[in-house]
Image (cartoon, rainbow, N blue to C red):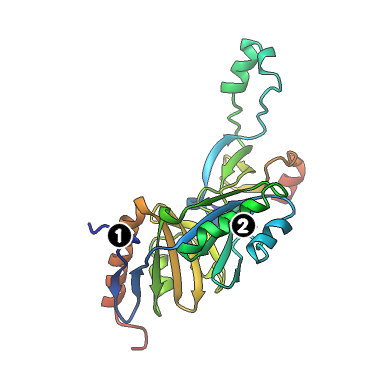
Amino acid sequence: MLLIHCPYCDETLPEAEFTYAGQAHIVRARTPSDQTDAEWEEFLFIRENVRGPHFERWRHFHGCGRYFNAVRDTVSDRFLTTYKAGEPRPDLSELEGRA
Amino acid sequence: MKTITSLTPAMLADSAAVRVESLGPQGRISLRARGDLSALNGALGLDLPTRIGHRASTEGMEALCLGPDEWVLVLAHDRVDAMLAALGAVYDDHPHSATSISGREVSLLIDGPRAAELLAIACPRDIATIAEGAGRRTVFDGASVVIWHDAPGRFRMDVWNSFASFVAQTLITGARELAAEPVEGG
Ligand SMILES: [Zn+2]
């Protein structure tokens, strides 16, 4: 089982308390009616599916209930960091240097 | 399977290892708020703890911080309406959400020298991380529960009605296994 650090609880806890919630930093258009079909397609369906560090959302479902963001390496399943929702995307080169 | 409800408190398991009881009706309020909490603290008569898992209490009421903007208040059933009115009186100063959830849950008492071991059979979190005097929302056998660590070897577990009979059955089975094992050094 993975151990995941919740940035709100500030505790490292078993994966069973959390649910996965897809790729992070996907921003909904401020004026949806201005979007073309291709832009909607991109927003709704197109995801990165990276091999390596992946920016993704998790929710501390059986805990504080909060959504937060994480960087997880999809090859090793190792979490490089977690951070609160709304915080900027962390610098990947710094994270990989630390890992 | 026996139906577990707060309407008919019952002894579910009782041995030298651990005792499990379902408790009677309990007043509960779910409170959501952000920002400067002083207006709410004034209405409640206590300082809401701002660290997740921490508790604060005053005469007849206890507050547990469940999330960055979420608390559960536990108090006598007949005081819930008055407390909601007191919170309502500061609503204009500090908009918030306060809802009675008294009927939503059953509280179970888990008490005895092996109480923490009983919780550990179906709780992936290390029970030792819930310090005495603290509490947490976590998962027990797939169901969201709130665990209160009240005293050494004494816990309370709040579980939604719809999961209560299932969770109680897991506790009964676990308690029976613990009772069948010789106590260490005994
Ligand atoms: Zn959390």
Tell me the element at label 2: helix
Q: Position of residue A62 (x, y in %)?
A: 50, 52
Tell me the element at label 1: loop
Residue pointed to by mark 2: B86
Q: Residues within 10 Å of mark 1 (few under 14, many from 20)?
A: many
The circle on residue A90 is: none
Establish whether ligand 1 lies closer than 8 Å to the Cβ of label 2: no
Q: Position of residue A90 (x, y in %)?
A: 74, 42
Q: Is residue B91 left or right of residue B140?
A: right
The disc numbered 1 marks a residue on which chain? B
If you read the primary sequence from the N terminus, does the residue marked by circle 2 or circle 1 appear first?
Answer: 1
The disc numbered 2 marks a residue on which chain? B
The circle on residue B4 is: 1
Q: Is residue A53 visible?
A: no
Q: Amino acid at mark 1?
A: Ile
Q: CA distance from mark 2 to mark 1?
A: 32 Å
- Toward which corner of the image does residue B21 lie, by quadrant? bottom left
